[in-house]
Structure formats: structure tokens, C-alpha cells
């Protein structure tokens, strides 16, 4: 941990010693060496069973397990000296459950603030694969071949559904609804592409760029306001995403 700021390293020591803690990892952009000057420090605290958060609560506001949903769980937003640190809680029993499901080619999506396409349950496996252990041990998580085979079709079903709803909003002249559904479709296609590549992704921040869909930025810079043109615009988004023309919608 020699490259961690002293205040962050001290926090690692504190949370690693909390009753119930199994491992502490460095996650996010700093673990991937893609951080910039404004990047914060993301620390993952893996625990099993109950976790005593008393020592963490003494340093700031803590959101206990379950506060952020079944996948994201909970955590804390802290400042350690001049450093911004996010501590993220991860229940190892939950992580192992969804990792086993991913190995079978199965996953679910949860709604979460800040995410357009939702959070896939295999996010927990992706974190295992991308984080850097600081204390303790966590299991490795290679991308499962069965997930590579099954996930793209699921994401593309979602993509086409979102585009269909974008057209519905467009017919009503609902610019916000059209744009929102079309943007979700872009994220869903990006997920499909990365699953085809057997490439883990932990969030949507660089999802479009990683999937090679940056050409869609120009399309979203030219959103018309008239209903007829708006429908055509959705069709152009679909074309850029490679949606087959005349696609049969299985939900109808």
C-alpha cells in the first residue's frame, strides 16, 4: 500500500480490522490506472455475515447494508485529509451467489440512481476481476463463456424494447421520453458488445467509448423537435446501433 496517501492507508487499516471484514480492495479508476487529477479513492470492503460499522461511522455518514439495494449494498462517503474516499460494502455471500449465476450465463438487472440501462448482477463479478486487493483475499472472476453466449441477446432484447418505446414517445411529441429511451438503448447495445467480447464493465461512465459507439454522440447532438422527424431520428439511432431493419418485436 506504499502508493496510497497516508490518510487513505490508515483508513484501510481501520476498515480491515472491523468485525466481519474479510478483505479490503482498491477499485474504480485508480485500480485500473485510468484515474485523473479529480479521481477519488474507491475502497471496497468485503464482509461475510454481519459487519460492525462502528469504526467507520466515527469518520462520517455511513449507509448500512441494504441502503443502496441488493447489489450496490451500502457504504460511506468520506474525506481523509484532502482526499475524497468512497467506501463500498460488499456482502461476500451475495457476491458469490451472483458470480455462480454468471457462470451459468444468468444475470438480472436492477434499477439504480445514475444508471440508464440498470445495473447487471454480474457487476459484482466484474468488480472482483478489476479491483486490487489491499488486505485479505477475494476470489478471481474470469468472464464466464456461458455469459458471453447468453448475455448479448438479453441486452439486445432490452435495446430493441427501449427503441420501441422511444418511437412511442416520438409519436406523441415527447422529446424527453424519446431521448431517454434512445439513450438507454445505446447503453444496452454497448453492454451487448462488451459481453460478446467477454469484457467486464463496472459502470456506465466509459461504456459508450469502450464499446466503440462514440459515433452516436453526433446523432444525439441533432435531436429534432417535430414528431415526424423525431420518429425518423429514433430510426437513425437504431441504424447506428445495427438493429436489423424489419425486426420482429417479440413482446407484441
Image (cartoon, helix red, strand yellow):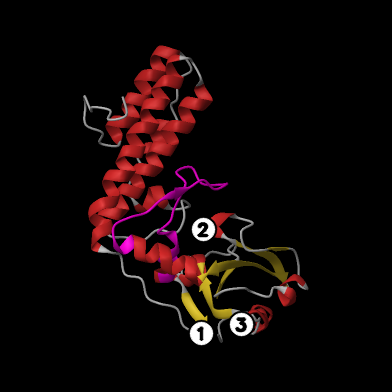
Say above or below: 238 vs 140: above
Crowd rating for badge 3 (residues with CA inside 10 Å; few <14, some 14–19, many 20+): many
Q: Which residues are magenta?
A: 102-128
Marker count (numbered): 3
Q: CA distance from mark 2 to mark 3?
A: 21 Å
Mark 2 vs 1, N-terminal side? 2
Say above or below: 126 vs 230: below
Where is residue 223 shown, x and y percent of the image?
A: 45, 25
Q: Which residue shows up at 24% across the image and 59% down it? A: 146
Q: Is residue 60 within the magenta segment?
A: no
Which residue position is annotated with label 2? 71
Where is residue 81 shown, x and y percent of the image?
A: 74, 74
Mark 1 vs 3, N-terminal side? 3
Where is residue 18 shown, x and y percent of the image?
A: 66, 81
Q: Which residue shows up at 50% across the image and 26% down it? A: 177
Figure quadrant of residue 100: bottom left
Q: Which mark is residue 16?
A: 3
Say above or below: 220 vs 48: above
Q: Is residue 54 left or right of residue 47?
A: right
Which residue position is annotated with label 1? 136
Marks 1/3 in contact by CB < 8 Å: the verdict is yes
Callout in the foreground (2, 1): 2
Between 135 and 73, the one nearer to me in the picture: 73
| Quadrant of image for the N terminus | bottom right
Crowd rating for badge 1 (residues with CA inside 10 Å; few <14, some 14–19, many 20+): few
| Quadrant of image for the C terminus | top left
Amino acid at each position: 500500500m506504499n502508493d496510497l496517501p497516508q490518510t487513505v492507508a490508515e483508513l484501510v487499516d481501520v476498515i480491515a480490522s472491523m468485525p466481519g471484514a474479510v478483505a479490503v480492495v482498491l477499485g474504480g479508476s485508480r485500480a485500473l490506472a485510468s484515474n485523473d487529477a479529480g479521481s477519488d479513492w474507491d475502497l471496497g470492503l468485503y464482509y461475510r455475515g454481519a459487519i460492525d460499522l462502528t469504526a467507520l461511522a466515527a469518520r462520517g455518514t455511513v449507509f448500512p447494508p441494504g441502503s443502496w439495494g441488493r447489489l450496490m449494498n451500502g457504504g460511506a462517503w468520506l474525506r481523509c485529509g484532502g482526499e475524497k474516499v468512497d467506501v463500498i460494502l460488499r456482502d461476500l455471500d451475495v457476491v458469490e451467489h451472483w458470480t455462480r449465476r454468471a457462470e451459468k450465463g444468468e444475470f438480472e438487472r436492477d434499477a439504480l440512481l445514475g444508471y440508464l440501462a440498470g445495473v447487471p448482477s454480474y457487476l459484482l463479478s466484474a468488480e472482483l476481476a478489476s479491483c486490487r486487493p489491499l488486505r485479505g483475499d477475494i476470489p478471481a472472476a474470469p468472464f464466464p463463456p456461458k455469459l458471453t453466449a447468453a448475455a448479448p441477446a438479453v441486452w439486445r432484447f432490452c435495446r430493441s424494447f427501449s427503441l420501441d418505446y422511444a418511437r412511442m414517445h416520438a409519436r406523441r411529441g415527447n422529446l424527453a421520453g424519446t431521448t431517454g429511451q434512445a439513450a438507454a438503448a445505446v447503453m444496452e447495445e454497448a453492454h451487448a458488445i462488451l459481453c460478446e467480447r467477454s469484457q467486464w464493465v463496472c459502470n456506465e461512465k466509459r461504456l459508450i467509448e469502450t464499446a466503440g459507439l462514440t459515433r452516436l454522440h453526433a446523432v444525439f447532438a441533432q435531436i429534432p423537435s417535430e414528431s415526424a422527424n423525431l420518429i425518423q431520428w429514433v430510426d437513425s439511432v437504431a441504424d447506428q446501433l445495427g438493429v436489423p431493419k424489419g425486426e420482429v418485436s417479440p413482446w407484441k
